[in-house]
Image (spheres, helix red, strand yellow):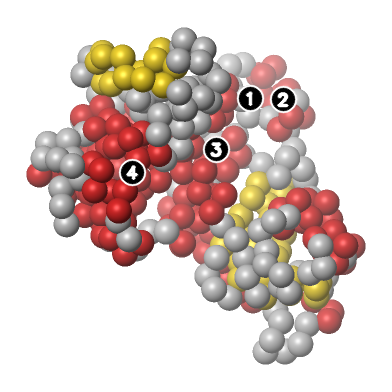
Amino acid sequence: MDKIFENPTKIFALTKEGTRELYDNLYNEMIEEDKDVVDYQEIKAMTTGALCPDCNSSHVIKNGLQSGVQNYRCKSCGRQFRVTTGTFMYGVHEKGKMLEYIKCMSAGMSLRECARIVHISLTTSFFWRHRILCAMQSFEDNVNFFGIVELEELLMNYSVKGKKKRDKQDTKKLTKKKPTKVAIIAATDRSGNILFKKLEDKRVQADHISDFLKSRISDNSVVCGSNKNAFKTVNAEHIKHKEITNKNKMKSGIYSVSTVHEKITDFVGWIYYKFRGVATKYLTNYIMWFVIKGKYLVEKIIEDTGRILNLAASDRRAWERYRDLMSQTYLINNI
């Protein structure tokens, strides 16, 4: 494959197979050419076109370099911004270490192991993980379902893991007001597409299911759900002429929810055995990590490093999502 950092325009003409090869070899090429994540961020901006973070205009021009990073100026509103503005790399000082950090994440290392190998603090390791995971949430837009779609409700305990309680009064207030359960919709089809979504509610409702499936399923799909009330009350009109099959009507060997139950079991085991549980505040990030592991990654460290980097670098609103996450209280709806 031609070296993309020598001639970035080559990426415009890549086939689907060539693009996959690019991601699989991206880490090795970056190491060989001594490139960092910001260098790749510039290539992503070139392939998709730079956009103003304020007015979203594509009428931008290059405006010199600042600390070695490309600057742009919007001709519509006058805003000046860097190639990293709005991305998961915005404000990162030790940009040269991020690629190795992503490699450590791909290898499944803990926060402490990542911090030790990359030579950053444990706090920075935590923040970097969630910068990357916030950027990966854009993958949700790529998930669609076909044929037989299985749905189920997953209820997880509300968690404030990692929260420091200042005094007894704070502890009493938190214990009194916190929710006990968090509802998640889990969905999969027979083609391997999978998506989990955390809801700001204690239980899954019929409207949640309708919104979740809207524009995600193909024509003539069959949706298999359990016999819980939310799934019983969903009908074809909710999701535009899709057939609904609840647990009582399922035909043995054709319709079932066994596949989604397996995915739920895998997810719960992954959360509680690998991470020993995660705070509900950060649950959406870990959900998307699990979805991407099952759908996008290939369980090979080098290949997955390139794929994660490409996915994270594709999201130009990752910083906003990360900033909003870190400013949230632990309690749902700011209770």
Determine the residue positioned at 68% across, 64% down: 217
Judging from the image, what secondary structure is the residue with disc 2 in? helix
Label 4 environment density (alpha carbons within 10 Å; few <14, some 14–19, many ≥20):
many
Mark 4 or mark 2, which is nearer to you?
4
Could you tell me which quadrant the C terminus lies in? top right
Q: Which residue is mark 1?
A: 329
Q: Left or right: where does residue 149 sit relative to residue 165?
A: right
As rendered, which of 12 and 147 lies closer to the eye?
12
Residue 55 in the image, given as x and y percentages of width and height: 55, 20
Q: Which residue is mark 3?
A: 282
Residue 146 in the image, given as x and y percentages of width and height: 63, 70
Q: Which residue is mark 4?
A: 309
Determine the residue positioned at 69% across, 17% down: 169
Could you tell me which quadrant the N terminus lies in? bottom left
Residue 201 in the image, given as x and y percentages of width and height: 77, 43
Determine the residue positioned at 50% across, 31% down: 317
Distance between mark 3 and mark 2 Cα atoms: 15 Å
Which amino acid type is shown beneath numbered disc 3?
A: Tyr
> In this picture, is 257 found above or below 273?
below
**Proximity of marks 1 and 2: CB atoms separated by less than 8 Å:** yes
**Proximity of marks 4 and 3: CB atoms separated by less than 8 Å:** no
**Proximity of marks 3 and 1: CB atoms separated by less than 8 Å:** no
Find the residue positioned furthest to the top. 78
Which amino acid type is shown beneath numbered disc 1?
A: Thr
Distance between mark 4 and mark 2 Cα atoms: 33 Å
Comes first in the chain, label 4 or label 3: 3
Comes first in the chain, label 4 or label 2: 4
Distance between mark 3 and mark 1 Cα atoms: 11 Å
Mark 4 or mark 3, which is nearer to you?
4
As rendered, which of 254 and 267 lies closer to the eye?
254
Which amino acid type is shown beneath numbered disc 4?
A: Leu
Q: Which residue is mark 2?
A: 334
